[in-house]
Amino acid sequence: MEIALSILVGIVVTCGAYLMLSGNMVRFLFGLALLSNAANLVIFAAGRLTYGAPPLIAPGEAGPLETVANALPQALILTAIVIGFGLLAFTLVLVHRANRSLGTVEGDAMRLAEPDEGAR
Amino acid sequence: MLLTLCLVVPLATFVVSFAVRRNADLQRSVSIAGSALLLLASLALGAQVVANGPVAAQMGGWPAPFGITLVADLLSAAMVVITGIIALAVSVYGLGDVDRDAERLGHHTLLHALLLGVTGAFLAGDLFNLYVWFEVMVIASFGLLGLGSRGDQIDGTVKYVALNLIATLAFLSGVGLLYGATGTLNMADLHQVVPTLENPVIVLTTAAMFLFAFGAKAALFPVFFWLPASYHTPSVTVSAVFAALLTKVGVYALIRVFTLVYDASTLPLIQNLLLWSASLTMLTGVLGAAAQNDIRRILSFHIISQIGYMILGLAVFTPLALVGAIFYILHHIVVKANLFLVGGVVRKLTGSEELGHIGGLWARTPWLGVLFLIPALSLAGIPPLSGFWAKLVIVKASLDAAYYIPAFLALLVGLLTVFSMSKIWLEAFWKPHPQPDAAATMTLSRAERWSLLTPIVALALITVAIGLIAGPFYGVSVVAAEQLLDPHAYVGAVLGENR
Amino acid sequence: MNSIILSAATRIVTPLMVAFSIFILLRGHNEPGGGFIGGLVAATAFALYAKAMGVPATLRALSLSPPTIAVVGLAMSTLAGLWGLVQSGVLLKGLWPLLTTADDGSKAGLPIGSVLVFDVGVYLVVVGSVLSILFALEADVAEENEGED
């Protein structure tokens, strides 16, 4: 299963990178979303996949009775999803603002912060 | 206890400054009090680490390597102290510089969120927490950059965000892969586990991912483009914090990871990459600066060039070189923040940061000229200021290790830095102002003079002190470098007797 | 949005969702659930309310602004962490003041402690920050539409 997941990660990263290479900031945003999900899947695969054994401890027991899924990557991914969600939301607002105040979502056309090269 | 205090203070300041946001005066007092408390807590932590060696604290009482660990060796403690100094300097400077609108939108609150992230990153004991603190820092910095919502600020923020997020994802993937290979993320634990890994590919892959991720945060060649595109757009106060702290967190992370987790001397490919990237960073930074005509853009490119020196110290990887790198970081944070602060005063007195539009400051305000020259000459490495000793140690270490080309580049870049600084000096201070009548009306009010100049004078005094009494500062760097190269005490403090 | 069906349904669904979110929050004590996921459910409930009744009505119904909710939550979590620091010298230490341990190791009393305070803080942070972002976007779009009219 890890192999299949790794291949999936590869495909998602490829799509994400392709989208991010576009000059359009909206596509960049979608690429970013794909890439951050790919990173989460990497962590998931790194923790090894265990089928049908949630990391829960039965009432009255001190620890799990049999092999269970690794709970740590799940906790890491949850944190990473939260952070990724926040960053993505911020970037979305930012691109929206950029479109409003600069009138474009093309990265190449955003040159307000650059020095005026025609002047020299 | 002190470790947690260094995090709790900015967190509490963040909450309280938000709670009192309707009362601007109170909010400013809270912000300054928070920075002062952070400085006190960090000084106490520094004293403790100097006296007893590395200290660690386990959050929630869960033992390492399973729980969250905060840990401070001398390098971390020194970085936290300097963060406290910069925090206090910029919160005082902000009184005269940050406009009401930015304050209303949450300047103080975001500033302390940023400080929280920076302090957390310096004290984090495991890689995933380092990631989380990086994110806290990055989100706060996004907010601070875009606060004004002016066109050029939005533009700068977009570029800053884009590259930072890619670096972040590389970091996260690296963390995932390393966890898959080792089953732990605690850096002290990794120090013991990574050398036992049998698969060299996974070691090299993860090391390269961290190199890219932290390199982008530190503005290393070739991933530095975001820095000059964004650092000149926000308020001067924000620029100064960014210039002082953000890239240095990247440098700190590189030093930490490549001494504690990986031994850079066992990874020749990584070491060579660091070496060449450092050399090119120095060179491109200073050449980029030479082409600029805006004070803050010149200074931004110089950050890049100076980062090269620090990474050169890491790349050479002899004890002396690491001493140089640490000394360089400590000196550079103070000097660079101060140059940005002076740049802000120049703008207030002349109405612009564009060198063609300003001038005549030496005739009007010679004291400002002196205050500019101290950090500027220190940056260029003129004795007896702090930058001289920093450059001296780095160059000597490179020569000792027979890295002649990087050492030559370091000297050449020092010379070109003098050129850049003298350009600002000649244009802003020496030549007459193109519109003397308009400039004469721009003066500082009494309150502004206090809030803007006190931090500048204080930072200049620190620069002079590091230069004239270099011994103790050098001594701290030596001990910090020893702890990096022999992390016994660090690992012991974190893992204990298998506590 | 002007839809009678949506606004009528929202009046019933929103309280149900908020109640459910609190159930998830409390269930997180020993079983899957918790502050984060509960907060998301509550945020969804208010987002639905905002869609049906408009943002101003939602802000009135919330009575606190979303950023304030988030910071109150952050303050609660911080205080829960500090509680452990003050009482046992360890930040974020779980403390159960209403729980007594008998000699044979069995526990009695109410399992309410710093962990619950922390989780409620997380819940509020999530509700507050998600709603802040949503309403900021919503206000932006509304402003734009006004400009075009």
Image (cartoon, rainbow, N blue to C red):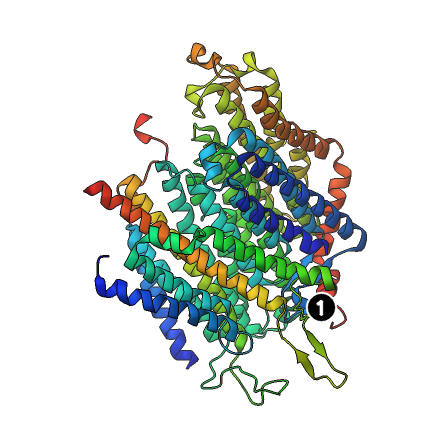
x, y percentage for residue B169? Answer: 45, 60
Q: How many marks?
A: 1
x, y percentage for residue B362? Answer: 56, 15
Q: Report the amino acid beneath label 1.
A: Leu
Q: Nearer the viewer, residue B189 or C15?
A: C15
- Can the viewer see residue B75? yes
Q: Which residue is mark 1?
A: B495
**Quarter of the image containing the N terminus of chain B?**
bottom right
- Who's the residue at 49% across and 60% down the image? C124
What is the quadrant of residue B265 in the picture?
Answer: bottom right
* Position of B219 relative to C120 (above/below): above
Q: Nearer the viewer, residue B274 or C111?
A: C111
- Who's the residue at 50% across and 67% down the image? C35
x, y percentage for residue B400? Answer: 68, 46
Specify the farthest residue to the right: B51
Classed neighbour count for the residue bearing mark 1: other residues with Cα under 10 Å, few (<14), some (14–19), many (≥20): some
* Position of B152 relative to A85 (above/below): above
Q: Secondary structure at mark 1?
A: helix
* Position of B399 relative to B364 (above/below): below
x, y percentage for residue B152? Answer: 37, 36
Q: Is residue B302 left or right of residue A19?
A: right
Specify the farthest residue to the bottom: A66
**Quarter of the image containing the C terminus of chain B?**
bottom right
What is the quadrant of residue B332 in the picture?
Answer: top right
